[in-house]
């Protein structure tokens, strides 16, 4: 509790400091919000057999404060919440949840974004995830054509690991820095560096330390013909073993412009990785197209083959592969919007399954939003994720299908009602995990006395993917 108190003093101190720096155009508001929610899960522990139902009632009183002025933008939310479990009565508890997000312009050509998240669920409860976070990132324009980017993120997490399905506590630190220079209308070069370490409360095969320098260059020979290339190196050492992974990857792509927003390309990528047991070459030729609608929305699709050359396990193969990177919002009318996202790739496995090594993955999702009536909005969503881990003793494949539906209703100016349903179907060939299905219903009522001050945000790809692919939480 003392830690929570110190954290709250720090947060409110920041709010006071920013409020004191405001001027006539600053907007400051403190707003209470009362919420009541009910959640039903038919498989609370996500098991294949012996499923356990659970009903969770949550009572929350949220206090939010917003400060918006020319060079400082700050939003704070503090919410004490009481959770009441129908079956797991020993889990009934009062938690404290805090979020702080801010933007500041300390100099003419420098912008900083920062944030803090205190999840409140400090108890490590099997079946529930939490994540305390702190981050800061910045951009500095050092010249007319040169930009520096930098940042650091800290996460103290308790969540379900992809490798085993167990809930574990771990802390991850990630530092990034980069330089971007543009030397022509479409010509630019970028150099980045990442350093990251993920440590566990108890020794774990997924704990690691890694660093990754990378570079990118784009050059156009003429308005209609150009090329780009990537080169990166990743060094990952696993903390509790002598295991390691070294990966050198690069690609070159030749591009032909068909129209202002449509390009075709021929591409070749090569990846080489080595571990303590084997080496792995990937030869990857492909052809495809880029349809770039806006700077952050478009569709890239390539067709090719992954030619695997392994030493140590004798499983060389030639596999067809679709190279996908798609994000597009279709507005059919003022009332109807369809959002699509999709990616594919191959790389060392992510932080929750780092010891599984090389993986090939496909991920796609869609969300349809429609205004049924003036105060009622509906949504339908579907998502798919497939991971193929090919460096394990027996090739492992994980597949997830996620379906969802929701209704948002504002019956009164100060009342919001949200109802949602989600279904998850998880299958795996891994020896440490079991298949399961999970159905969830969620109902929440918010009582808000007036519209809160918040920093303006546009729909983003990250927000969409966080909504679609929340299969374990």
Image (spheres, helix red, strand yellow):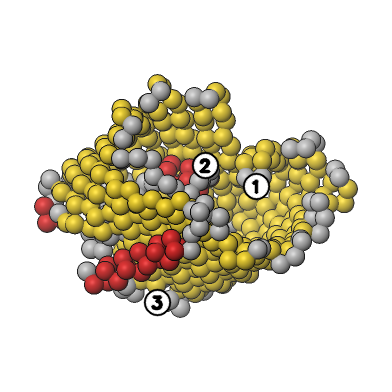
Look at mark 2 in the image and give the residue it sits on: 459
Residue 143 at x, y = what percent? 75, 65
Residue 396 at x, y = what percent? 43, 53
Which circle's residue, 1 or 2, is located before the other in the chain? 1
453 relative to 97 in the view: left or right: right
Q: Quadrant of residue 43?
A: top left
Numbered circle sitting on residue 305: 1
* Residue extending furthest toward the right: 222
For label 3, count other residues whose C-alpha is less than 10 Å away and answer few (under 14), some (14-19) or many (20+): some
Taking the image as drawn, is residue 442 in sight? no
Which circle's residue, 1 or 3, is located before the other in the chain? 3
- Say if 284 sits above or below 289 in the image: below
Q: CA distance from mark 3 to mark 2?
A: 41 Å
Taking the image as drawn, is residue 105 in sight? yes
- Say if 230 sits above or below 220 in the image: below
Look at mark 3 in the image and give the residue it sits on: 240
Q: Nearer the viewer, mark 3 or mark 2?
A: 2
Q: Nearer the viewer, mark 1 or mark 3?
A: 3
Numbered circle sitting on residue 277: none
Number of numbered discs: 3
277 relative to 39 in the view: left or right: right
240 relative to 329 in the view: left or right: left
For label 1, count other residues whose C-alpha is less than 10 Å away and answer few (under 14), some (14-19) or many (20+): some
Q: Which of the two residues, 385 or 378, is positioned nearer the viewer here? A: 378
Q: Nearer the viewer, mark 1 or mark 2?
A: 2
Give me the residue at 46% from left, 70% from top. 173
- Say if 2 sits above or below 104 in the image: below
79 relative to 463 in the view: left or right: left
Could you tell me which secondary element the residue under label 3 belongs to? loop
Q: Which of the two residues, 310 or 208, is positioned nearer the viewer here? A: 208
Q: CA distance from mark 1 to mark 2?
A: 34 Å
């Amino acid at each position: 509790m003392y830690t929570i108190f110190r954290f709250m003093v720090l947060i409110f101190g920041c709010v006071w400091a920013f409020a004191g720096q405001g001027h006539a155009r600053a907007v400051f508001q403190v707003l209470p919000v009362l919420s009541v929610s009910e959640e039903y899960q038919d498989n609370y522990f996500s098991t294949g057999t012996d499923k356990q139902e659970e009903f969770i009632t949550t009572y929350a009183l949220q206090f939010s404060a917003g400060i918006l002025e020319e060079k400082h933008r700050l939003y704070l939310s503090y919410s004490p919440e009481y959770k009441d479990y129908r079956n797991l009565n020993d889990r009934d508890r009062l938690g404290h949840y805090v979020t702080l997000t801010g933007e500041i312009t300390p100099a003419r050509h420098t912008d900083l974004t920062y944030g803090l998240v205190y999840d409140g669920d400090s108890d490590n409860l099997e079946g529930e995830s939490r994540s305390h976070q702190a981050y800061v990132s910045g951009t500095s324009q050092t010249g007319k054509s040169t930009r520096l980017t930098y940042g650091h993120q800290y996460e103290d997490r308790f969540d379900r690991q992809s490798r085993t399905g167990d809930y574990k506590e771990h802390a991850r630190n990630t530092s990034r820095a980069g330089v971007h220079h543009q030397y022509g209308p479409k010509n630019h070069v970028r150099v980045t560096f990442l350093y990251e370490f993920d440590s566990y409360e108890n020794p774990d095969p997924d704990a690691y330390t890694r660093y990754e320098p990378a570079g990118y260059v784009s050059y156009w020979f003429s308005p209609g013909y150009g090329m780009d290339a990537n080169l990166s190196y990743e060094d990952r050492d696993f903390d509790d073993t002598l295991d390691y992974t070294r990966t050198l990857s690069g690609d070159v792509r030749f591009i032909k412009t068909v129209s202002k927003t449509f390009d075709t390309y021929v591409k070749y990528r090569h990846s080489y990785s080595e571990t303590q047991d084997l080496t792995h070459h990937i030869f990857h030729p492909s052809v495809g197209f880029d349809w770039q609608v806006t700077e952050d929305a478009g569709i890239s699709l390539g067709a090719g083959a992954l030619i695997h050359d392994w030493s140590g396990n004798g499983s060389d193969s030639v596999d067809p592969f679709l190279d996908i990177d798609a994000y597009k919002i279709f507005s059919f009318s003022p009332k109807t919007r369809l959002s699509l996202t999709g990616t594919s790739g191959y790389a060392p496995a992510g932080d929750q399954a780092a010891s599984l090594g090389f993986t090939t993955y496909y991920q796609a999702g869609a969300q349809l939003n429609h205004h049924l009536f003036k105060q009622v909005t509906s949504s339908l969503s579907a998502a798919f994720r497939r991971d193929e881990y090919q460096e394990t003793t027996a090739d492992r494949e994980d597949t997830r299908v996620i379906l969802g539906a929701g209704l948002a209703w504002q019956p009164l100016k100060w009342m919001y009602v949200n109802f949602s349903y989600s279904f998850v179907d998880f299958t795996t060939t891994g020896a440490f995990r079991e298949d399961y299905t999970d159905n969830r219903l969620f109902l929440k009522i918010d009582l808000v006395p007036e519209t809160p001050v918040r920093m303006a945000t546009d729909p983003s790809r990250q927000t969409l993917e966080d909504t679609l692919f929340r299969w374990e939480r």
